[in-house]
Amino acid sequence: MSTLGERLKMIRGAEKQEDFAARMGISKSSMSGYEKDENLPGADAISKICLKAGISSDWLLFGKGSMQGSEEAGVARALDHKVSPEDLIMIPMVDAILSAGTGSLETSGQMAREYAFRQDFILRKGNPANMVLMRVRGDSMQPEVMDNDVVLLDQSKTRPHPGPIFAVGIEDAIYLKRVDMLPGQIILKSVNTDYEPIRIDMGEQTSDQFRVIGQVLWVGREYK
């Protein structure tokens, strides 16, 4: 199922939309908007649907894992643990595209939508006020980060070091790469061996154009 709306229709099956919405404790008009992918459910609606339908919110939101799924840190799951809206934190999806290939233009950064995460998971990772979600285009970080994945970024973590994946910007392009720092030089590395490392000489002019946007904390994947 490629969209949240299609997954909701799968859960509902042959049941009338009006009856299904009433059973979930959600208005018919709201459910209609969710199924048409015109609107995204908020934390309260997600909690109600997952609890009453007995499904994983990770699967409902992103199509990740099985419908019931086992418990794991990440997007809130409601099958094994009863999740109330107070247990969730909404993280905004930034209207921008991260490139894991040759780079893509950064857009305005306006908030397009929000996704619910378990509060305990997010607070272990850092301050949610510094976190945003962005979608990835490109295959240079495969198989760790695939084309069309969503990544959770901590924008306060802007000091690159070997190991983690960072979102970095060069002029108007933004990339998802591992970063090595050498004297006077930055090396951006891909996971996909088809891509050669990008070497940046950190002169005075280049240092003004290069920036670290944030560190990747989590990756979400939607299966079609």
Image (cartoon, rainbow, N blue to C red):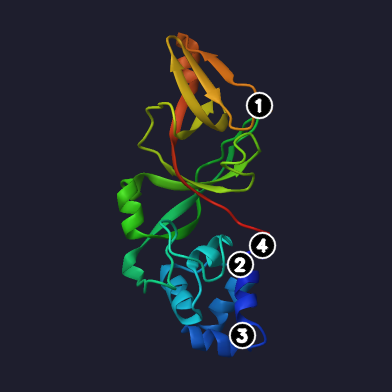
- Quadrant containing the C terminus is bottom right
Picture coordinates of residue 18, whole percent (x, y): 59, 88
Looking at marks 3 and 1 on the same chain, the residue that comes earlier in the sequence is marked by 3
**Residue bearing the label numbered 3:** 17
Looking at marks 1 and 4 on the same chain, the residue that comes earlier in the sequence is marked by 4
Instruction: Answer left or right for 141 relative to 115.
Output: right
**Residue bearing the label numbered 2:** 38
- Image quadrant where residue 157 sits: top left
What is the C-alpha distance between the residues marked 1 and 2? 37 Å
Give the mark toward the camera: 1 or 4.
1
**Residue bearing the label numbered 4:** 2
| Image marks 3 and 1: residues in contact by CB distance under 8 Å | no
Total marks shown come to: 4
What is the C-alpha distance between the residues marked 3 and 1? 48 Å
Is label 2 in a helix, a strand or a loop?
loop
Identity, as a three-letter code, of the amino acid under mark 1? Tyr
Q: Which of the two residues, 196 or 115, is positioned nearer the viewer here? A: 196
Picture coordinates of residue 100, whole percent (x, y): 60, 35
Instruction: Determine the residue positioned at 56% across, 16% down.
Output: 199
Instruction: Determine the residue positioned at 56% across, 83% down.
Output: 28
Looking at marks 2 and 3 on the same chain, the residue that comes earlier in the sequence is marked by 3
Mark 3 surroundings within 10 Å by alpha-carbon count, few (fewer than 14), some (14 through 19), many (20 or more): some
